[in-house]
Image (cartoon, rainbow, N blue to C red):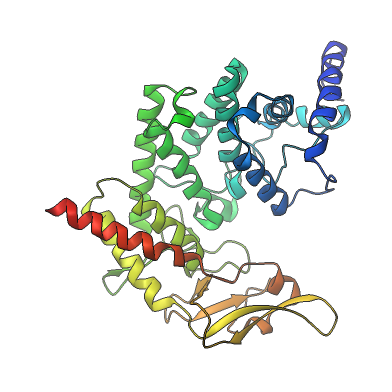
Amino acid sequence: MLRFKNIYLTRTAIIISACLVAIAPAVAQKDTHNTPKMAREWRSFVKEKPVEWFGSKEAECIAHNILLYQRSCGGWPKNVRMSDSLSIPQEAAIEDEKELTQDATIDNGATTTELAFLARIYNVTKHPAYREAFAKGFKFLQKMQLSNGGWPQFYDRKGYYTHITYNDNAMVNVMILLKKLADRDALFEQITTESDASIARKMFDKGVDCILKTQIVVDGTPTVWCAQHDEKTLKPAKARAYELPSFSGLESAEITKLLMNISNPSPEIIRAVKSAMAWFDRAKITGKKLETFTNSEGKRDRRLVDDSLAAPIWARFYNLDDMRPFVCDRDGVKKYDISEIGYERRTGYGWYGDWPQELYPKYEKWLRKLSKAKK
């Protein structure tokens, strides 16, 4: 039995009727299931909107959805495109799930994207409900931070979800937001207080400490990071069957960029960045490129091919013992050629990319800045 009164349903019906008209252009066709693609669409949707748009009826209706989806613990579920229109029964079902905590997460941009939206719309409207929801979401991030400074993927789940999660930049996304809060960034200055900024700074610093402690050390030399680390031992840890303990090319690139964006870095941060960049140099794959082609079944497929002119690429995962790039199917068995894993994982996961490439010009600029600071 859904817990709704007639007066609420009447008010909701009025809001939904207005929102169906307001946000219909933003919704092409509602997917049946939540997917990572929907999460990417939602994040892009928020980033692309100009400031003035946040005073529109469409923005108000999306904010209504954000408030609706926020769990009582303060976080949000992932892979939800908040710009989708909702029927009265759908709203009722979501409202009935308010007390759920198992799906509140920072994965796939969840919670951080909603907080950014709330800050933007509050700056335009000054609606107290948005400030209240933001404060609740910020408190959620505080509660979710582990004593070691890291963040798990989910707030209230067991298993690998409790690991320190760098995977898909979950923890980095949180720390980018916290840094902006701490630095009194214009986006968050109106919706937060000086006390919030102080709390955010302490949270960020604890996160940096966690990053430094989890950097994998080989023969006394720091390297990079795994996509997830055990929350107790801080060692590289397994997540899904195909996400094995390893050096991570993707996640390590974003962590390194985060560290390079810290003003007045400590000697420990400087060492961590220099060590990571040295590792990227050793780990880059040359003379190869990831090619998309049409296979014998007429399907879009992927393969790694020789190309002497190709720009360097990096693997998502590398062995911890010999740095050999590997791929993996859902059976958890390592393979060293992407053609050896099944079609579903071969085409449905980012095994190779140029993620660290953008770091190189940033690194040169960062080194010059350090050099000037010493003079």
Q: Nearer the viewer, residue 354 or 192?
A: 354
The extreme left residue here reads 375
Q: Residue at horizontal 63%, vertical 73%?
A: 332
Name the quadrant containing residue 277. Answer: bottom left
x, y percent for residue 45: 67, 42
Q: Quadrant of residue 244?
A: bottom right
Q: The N terminus is located in which quarter? A: top right
- The residue depicted at 69 percent of the width and 34 percent of the height is 100
Residue at the limit of the structure toward the top, as seen here: 7
Q: Is residue 371 left or right of residue 258?
A: left
Q: Is residue 87 left or right of residue 326?
A: right
Above/below status of 137 relative to 102: above
Q: Say if residue 104 shows up in the picture.
A: no
- Residue 368 drawn above or below residue 301: above
Q: Is residue 195 left or right of residue 95?
A: left
Q: Nearer the viewer, residue 293 or 234?
A: 293
Give the mark count.
Answer: 0
Measured from the top left, where is residue 218 in percent x and y?
A: 32, 72
Corner quadrant of residue 344: bottom right
Q: Is residue 272 above or below residue 83?
A: below
Closer-to-camera residue (264/328) = 264
Residue 361 x %, y % = 37, 63
Instruction: Answer whether residue 180 is visible to the viewer in this image.
Output: yes
Viewer-proximal residue among 263 and 55:
55
